[in-house]
Image: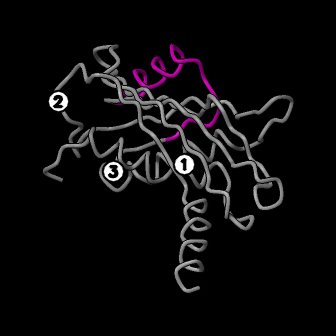
Amino acid sequence: MKKLIFLVSAIALSGCADTHKLNVSEQSSTNKIAPSSSVYIALSHDGSYGEKYYNGSGKMLSNIIRARVIAQIHDVSVATTPESLRAALATASEKHYDYLLYPTIMHWEDRATEWSGKPDKVEVKISTWDVSADQEVNSVIIEGKSGLGTFGGDHPQDLLPQPISEYLDTLFDSNV
């Protein structure tokens, strides 16, 4: 009987785990972002799923990125309005930033997982640009999916800090 209870518990708990996947592009530069660099983080347009728009989701994404970057670099700013890539590069250049992080929400799905059995899902792209060279240095597509046993506590933004941190760790100078 104890084995059966253990087996059922293990199966139930395996559905509770969030998952994520990082699809990182080939890095076109071996240079890492130094702590003395400056970074401009663009503001993503808000995400949507079908006809439902998630107001503030773009700001949440940019702020999650900022929270991780500010631990490594002191000169970090987040845009106040969404911009196209070219406009964000122009802003970063005008304000003399070294790098641009350009996030894009590709999919944002906040579900009532606890009663629907459907997980929250998120897919975002972050492009990293060397502003003075006007060249993309690297990019990543992050996909996340909540576990089924969330008890109403997970949202798409909760699926992002860990994979964003993993990606940004590949960009920063390890001597920090």
Of badges 1 and 3, the one in the foreground is 1
Quarter of the image with the N terminus in it:
bottom right
- Give the residue furthest to the front: 1
Disc nearer the start of the sequence (2/3): 2
Local packing at callout 1 (Cα closer than 10 Å; few below 14, some 14-19, many 20+) is some
Asked whether 104 or 66 is in front, the reply is 104
Res 101 → quadrant: top left
Q: Which residues are magenta?
A: 78-97
Residue under label 3: 74
Q: Residue at x 69, y 49 (%)?
A: 119
36 relative to 155, above or below: above
Residue 33 pos. (x, y %): 24, 37
Kind of residue at badge 2: Asn
Q: Residue at x 36, y 23 (%)?
A: 129
Kind of residue at badge 1: Asn
Residue under label 1: 63
Residue under label 2: 31
Residue 77 is marked as none
Distance from disc 1 to disc 3, alpha carbons, whole Å, reads 15 Å
Q: Residue at x 57, y 43 (%)?
A: 61
Asked whether 134 or 112 is in front, the reply is 112
Disc nearer the start of the sequence (2/1): 2
Disc nearer the start of the sequence (1/3): 1
